[in-house]
Image: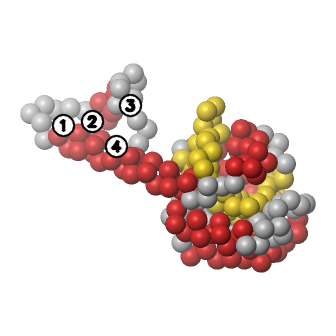
Amino acid sequence: MHIGMVGLGKMGMNLVANMRDHDIEVTAFDLNDKAREAVGQYGAKAVANLDALVMSLASPRIIWSMVPAGKPTEATISQLAKLLRPDDIVIDGGNSYYQDSIAHGKLLAAEGIHFFDVGTSGGMAGARADGNFMIGGDKAIFNKIEPLFKAIAAKGGYLYTGPAGSGHYLKMVHNGIEYGMMQAIGEGFDVLAHSPYDYDNAAVANMWNNGSVIRSWL
């Protein structure tokens, strides 16, 4: 399997390293010269632009976009719609708004290109190894990319969620739960800080992380 990666920030770079650990060939593009140089340490190739990235891949191409949500993702998808060919596959692994992902799916489908919106969880550690992925797109095409997720995800750590938009919708709900957990943790430690007792909150957090029902790396 040969993947084209667009975006070599903290998540994209770690995903490349994860893929290379599983002998997945990667050619990558980033606007940053230093990022393109750094990806070579993982045995991946780097190219100077999207045109070269597309040209480096055999059909049907699989391109994973890991750029910021909003205008950067929109610009990347629009460029790929012009460069790719029918039956190629685009994966948006960023944290895009699900309605944008529905629109991107329709834009690419008009060109015969398959689109998957992938909610990616686990932070940089998950990107580097044993990630967690929520995958929306065409069920009939999913089997072509499932080996990729089997390789880079934790055991049981990926799920096909339905049509385009469903992956990022699930990630949106996931994030809401995550932020609620973070707020609860913060409020709990605030209560401890204002209690009549002199707790060592770092020690409390460490203790709770070892066997407690509320253990968390958040």
* Front-lying residue, 172 or 151: 172
Q: Is residue 69 left or right of residue 108?
A: left
Tag 3: residue type?
Arg
Spatial separation of the CA atoms under disc 4 and disc 3: 11 Å
Q: Residue at position x 18%, y 37% from top?
A: 192
Q: Nearer the viewer, mark 4 or mark 2?
A: 4
State whether residue 84 appears in this view.
yes
Q: Residue at position x 54%, y 72% from top?
A: 70
* 10 Å crowding of disc 4: few (<14), some (14-19), many (20+): some
Spatial separation of the CA atoms under disc 4 and disc 2: 17 Å
CB atoms at circles 3 and 2 under 8 Å apart? no
Mark found first going from the N terminus, 4 or 2: 4
CB atoms at circles 4 and 3 under 8 Å apart? no
CB atoms at circles 3 and 1 under 8 Å apart? no
Q: Nearer the viewer, mark 3 or mark 1?
A: 3
Q: Nearer the viewer, mark 4 or mark 3?
A: 4
Residue wearing tag 3: 215
What label does residue 181 carry, if any?
4
Query: In the picture, residue 94 is in which quadrant?
Result: bottom right
* Front-lying residue, 213 or 125: 213
Spatial separation of the CA atoms under disc 4 and disc 1: 17 Å
Mark found first going from the N terminus, 1 or 2: 1
Q: Is residue 188 left or right of residue 75?
A: left
Residue wearing tag 1: 192
Residue wearing tag 2: 201
Spatial separation of the CA atoms under disc 1 and disc 2: 8 Å
Assign a secondary structure to mark 3.
Answer: loop
Spatial separation of the CA atoms under disc 3 and disc 1: 16 Å
Q: Position of residue 201 (x, y in %)?
A: 27, 35
